[in-house]
């Protein structure tokens, strides 16, 4: 590949400056409250940003903190967050959250291992909370980061978790917190999983378009 990882990140950062901002980053700009960032991140899984934003606003109007969340019934939470994806599962996670946070005095912990014990929290969510809520260097690898890092051949991995491990070795730490915010808008608006817009992509000439799965589908899906 002709572009190095750091140059790619820097060029991409400029490219996405005017793209749509991911919802969790938007919520983080409005509040640095780890509780709200954690809940919004849980709600955002498999859900469009617009839907997450509406559901988060509705929920936070009724439950701005963990104590208020504990006072809501399961039915009420379900009604507030619907129609985020998997709202039944997410309702259960939110119902369990007050008890799960008791060992931390009702506060969201700032350690990966502790975050991973919370209901509905996997590595992607935990790393995003560490990075966005606490400013702790952590690489949040979602489907876009995993896919695009493989398309470019910066990593050659099968799972987001292995992509995270690989990136920990090759990505300078100063980019750990922001890599997700830079790549997600690009993956949502230009380098889409289906029908990537290569013809109007800044990187058309340099992109190696690697990753087997991507190559198989590439010509069929390109627009
Ligand atoms: S050229 Fe196509 S595959 Fe490569 S980064 Fe741009 S949109 Fe993605």
Image (tube, rainbow, N blue to C red):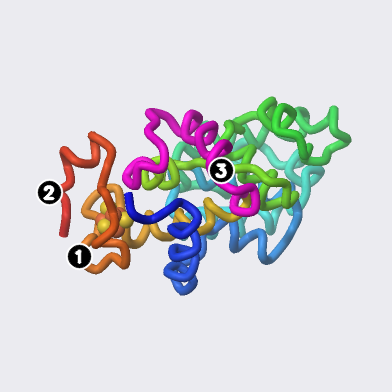
Residue nearer the viewer, 129 or 209: 209
Q: Which mark is residue 152?
A: none
- On screen, residue 189 versus residue 117, left or right, reads left
Tell me if label 2 and label 1 are in contact, CB under 8 Å.
no
Residue 111 lies, with reference to residue 48, above or below; the image says above
Foreground mark, 3 or 1? Answer: 1
Q: What residue is disc 3 on? A: 140
Q: Examine the rendering and report whether any part of residue 96 can be seen.
A: no
Residue 145 place in picture, x, y as percent: 44, 46
Q: Examine the rendering and report whether any part of residue 188 can be seen.
A: yes
Report, in whole angstroms, how far the alpha carbon at label 2 lies from the one at label 3. Answer: 29 Å
- On screen, residue 221 versus residue 148, left or right, reads left
**Mark 2 packing: few (<14 Cα in 10 Å), some, or many (20+)?**
few
Q: Which mark is residue 219?
A: 2
Mark found first going from the N terminus, 2 or 1: 1
Q: Which quarter shows the C terminus?
A: bottom left
- On screen, residue 161 versus residue 96, left or right, reads left
> Which residue shows up at 61% across the image and 33% down it?
121
Residue nearer the viewer, 158 or 173: 173
Report, in whole angstroms, how far the alpha carbon at label 3 lies from the one at label 1. Answer: 28 Å
Classify mark 3: helix, strand or loop: loop
As drawn, the residue found furthest toward the bottom would be 18
**Mark 1 packing: few (<14 Cα in 10 Å), some, or many (20+)?**
few
> Which residue shows up at 67% across the image and 38% down it?
73
Q: What residue is disc 1 on? A: 199
Question: Which range of residues does the magenta coloring cover?
Answer: 150-176
């Amino acid at each position: 590949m002709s572009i190095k990882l750091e140059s790619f990140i820097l060029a991409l950062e400029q490219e996405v400056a005017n793209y749509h901002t991911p919802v969790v980053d938007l919520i983080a700009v409005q509040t640095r409250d780890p509780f709200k960032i954690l809940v919004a991140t849980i709600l955002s899984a498999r859900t469009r940003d617009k839907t997450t934003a509406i559901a988060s606003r509705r929920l936070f109007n009724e439950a701005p903190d963990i104590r208020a969340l504990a006072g809501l019934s399961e039915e009420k939470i379900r009604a507030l967050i619907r129609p985020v994806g998997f709202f039944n599962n997410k309702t259960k996670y939110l119902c369990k959250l007050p008890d799960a946070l008791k060992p931390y005095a009702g506060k969201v912990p700032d350690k990966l291992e502790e975050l991973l014990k919370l209901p509905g929290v996997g590595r992607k969510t935990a790393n995003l909370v560490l990075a966005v809520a606490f400013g702790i260097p952590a690489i949040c690898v979602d489907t876009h980061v995993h896919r695009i890092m493989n398309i470019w051949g910066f990593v050659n991995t099968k799972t987001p978790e292995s992509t995270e491990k690989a990136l920990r070795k090759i990505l300078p730490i100063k980019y750990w917190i922001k890599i997700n915010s830079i790549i997600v808008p690009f993956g949502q608006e230009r380098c889409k999983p289906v029908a990537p817009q290569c013809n109007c992509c800044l990187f058309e000439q340099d992109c190696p378009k690697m990753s087997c799965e991507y190559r198989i589908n590439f010509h069929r899906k390109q627009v």
